[in-house]
Structures are given as structure tokens and as C-alpha cells.
Amino acid sequence: MAQDLARRPWRAHAHGRLLAGLQASLHAVPAPGWLRRRFATGDPARDRVLHLDLHPENVILTPDGPVLIDWSNTAGGDPAADTALTVAILRGVSLGPVRDTGLRLFLAGFLRAAPADPAPRMAEVITARLADPNLLPAEAHRLRRLTRRTPGGD
């Protein structure tokens, strides 16, 4: 998906909606009891399968449809947290002025079709993201700026 966005940036909004649809399909799956929990709902029956690293580089577009990859962070929990984490990932990156416009369009498409409202979990997710040792300093700076702008990070 990331490569397709680089070649055809005018598809950013549509790809954002596609990513949201993939996330919605994933959130329709109840989390099995053996799956570790993260950002749990407090009611195991309401926990759903969460990818927790969903962004364009983890979607391969194939002739048979999109395929999600990189399942290393998968857990059971609140879909709002998974949606919020995707927003945090997308808002943390910068691709340069021209490509950032495409990223904003992608995010707008994603949020328009998002399977869950990210607001209730945004602050918690940003805190978790900032604790990630793999987070680049520039990403951390952008996320900290985001949390100072608005209480929920939106």
C-alpha cells in the first residue's frame, strides 16, 4: 500500500478508507481466550482482535485483495485503542511537505471510515507509543506536540 501511495498519491483518501475497512473486519473477530490482552475493555466478551501496528507499510495489495502483515503486536482488546494507535502512528510520521499532504488525505479517509472512535483511547495510546524504545525522536516530538495541542490528541 505504501508503494502504491508513492506511485499514485491521488489514491490516498481511498487507501485510508481501505485501511479502515480492513481494521473493521479485524475488529469483527472476538479475541480468543489464549490471545494476550492489551488495552482490554474490562469485559473479555467485548475484546476483539487488534493488530496494533496497522499502517500502509503493513498492507500488501495483491490481485486477490489486500493482505495484512506483521502480526507481532497482535492482542485482544478495545477496538478504539487499535484505531487510536493507527492515528498516532500516522500523525507521528513526516514524509516531507508534499507527501505530508497525501498523508493528511490518507488519515482523513481513514478517520471517515474508522471502525471505532479513537478519542477515548488516544491519550493512553500516545503514552504507550512514547514508551516504545523503537520510536524515532522526531516521531516522539510530533506526538508530544499533538498531546499539547488538544486534550484528547485530536
Image (tube, rainbow, N blue to C red):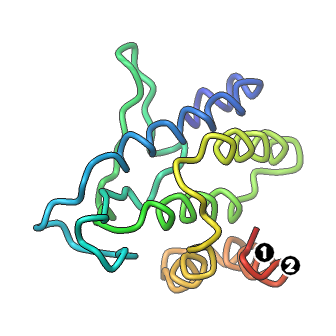
- Left or right of 92: which side holds 80? left
- Farthest residue to the left: give it: 34
Screen quadrant of the C terminus: bottom right
* Residue drawn where x is 78% and y is 75% of the image: 146
* Residue drawn where x is 37% and y is 50% of the image: 27
Q: Residue 20: image x %, image y %? A: 54, 42
| Real-space CA distance between mark 2 and mark 1, rounded to the nearest whole angstrom | 5 Å
Tag 2: Cα neighbours inside 10 Å, few (<14), some, or many (≥20)?
few
Q: Residue 61: image x %, image y %? A: 45, 25
Rendering quarter of residue 12: top right
- Callout 2: helix, strand or loop? helix
* Residue drawn where x is 12% and y is 67% of the image: 33
Rendering quarter of residue 75: bottom left
Residue designated by label 2 = 149
- Callout 1: helix, strand or loop? helix
Q: Residue 43: image x %, image y %? A: 28, 75
Rendering quarter of residue 18: top right
Type of the residue with mark 1: Leu
The vertical placement of 100 against 50, above or below, is: above
- Left or right of 47: which side holds 78? right
Asked if the residues shown at circle 2 and circle 1 are in contact, with their CB atoms under 8 angstroms apart, the answer is: yes
* Residue drawn where x is 61% and y is 31% of the image: 15
Which mark identifies residue 146? 1
Type of the residue with mark 2: Arg
- Farthest residue to the top: give it: 63
Tag 1: Cα neighbours inside 10 Å, few (<14), some, or many (≥20)?
some
The vertical placement of 63 against 11, above or below, is: above
Screen quadrant of the N terminus: top right
